[in-house]
Image: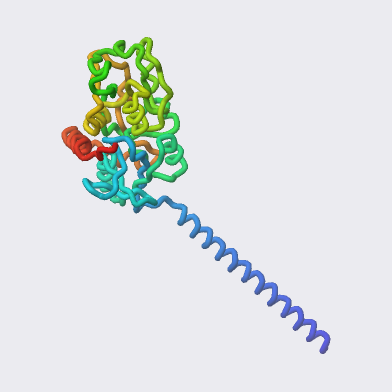
Amino acid sequence: MRKKFISIMVLSLIGLFILGGCAAEDESKTNGEEAGDGEETENVENTDTFKVGLEAGYAPFNWTQLDDANGGVPIQGSKEFAGGYDVQIAKKIADGLGRELEIVKIGWDGLVPSLNSGMVDAIIAGMSPTAERKESIDFSENYYNSDLVMVVKKGGEYEDAKVLDDFSGANITAQLNTFHYSVIDQIDGVNKDTAMSDFPAMRVALESGIIDGYVSERPEGVSASAANDNFYMVEFEEGFEASEEDTAVAVGLKKGSDLIDDINEIVEEISQEERQEIMDDAILNQPSAN
């Protein structure tokens, strides 16, 4: 009888141990699922900020400055600020989205990869919505339209140029990985120099005589000639052939971005008159070094 009693007690203890183990396992699973849910929450897009990538080196669209003058915005991870037309447009979009604007300074070639990797929410950097770019990212409605010009030395042999053929034999370049560089081929007999990384580099090359001119859009041409008395902007009577998508400027967004409809609505609310006023102010306020 005693042996039977002891056997019953042992079996009861074993049962309690098994039940306790199952309960602990269930609790562990529950805690693990909750932790997993927490990690997923941390990876959800931050809807409090609107991170915008730009070069901060393409005046008057965007540039780098030392303070917040004329509506400058702090550059992430830097003591510098970004200013210019793109920055003012970015501020309007951020306000319309109800988010805080963050500017991320990125080299031109790094903008699209940074967008697709999730480092930034949008590209607002004087970028044209070309067919090639549309293969990898989406674009909003245009927020600016321009035309192509040539920036040359003031008082030089190309200041009086009116048509493309006037640049036959000239050393001409444009920014790397832009359609500006491809249209140089439309000039018969031109010496097509190696493409350059950014506009400050091209301005230095022009100043030093390494090149005779560079292809740009009208706002940058106005900016260059306003910032440096030695530069002159050539506006053609018969100029480059380019599609509207090549000369327009739009917000770059990741494929399938949920922001595109809201951004389109915000952009459409900015009148042409206001856009021109913002550009005029940007040209007036640009740092002379840009």
**In the drawing, does residue 16 fall left or right of residue 236?**
right
Res 235 → quadrant: top left
Which quarter of the rendering shows the C terminus? top left
Query: In this rendering, does residue 272 appear at all?
Result: yes
How many marks on residues? 0
The residue positioned 39% from the left and 51% from the top of the image is: 77
The answer to whether residue 270 is visible is no
Q: Can you give x and y, in whole percent of width and height, for residue 274 in the image?
A: 17, 37
Query: In the rendered view, does 26 fall on the left or right side of 47?
Result: right
Residue 132: x and y, percent?
Answer: 42, 26
The image quadrant that residue 283 belongs to is: top left
Q: In this view, does 69 lie above or below 147?
A: below
- Judge by depth and name the residue closer to the eye, 120 or 196: 196
Question: What is the residue that sits farthest to the front in this orientation?
Answer: 208
Q: Is residue 34 above or below residue 48?
A: below
Residue shown at the point (54%, 61%) measured from the top left: 33
Residue for point 75% across, 78% down: 11
Residue 134 lies, in percent from the top left, at 41, 29
Residue 29 point in image, percent of width and height? 59, 64
Residue 20 lies in quadrant: bottom right
Task: Choose between 110 and 169: the one closer to the eye.
Answer: 169
Q: Residue 231, relative to residue 260: is it above or below?
A: above
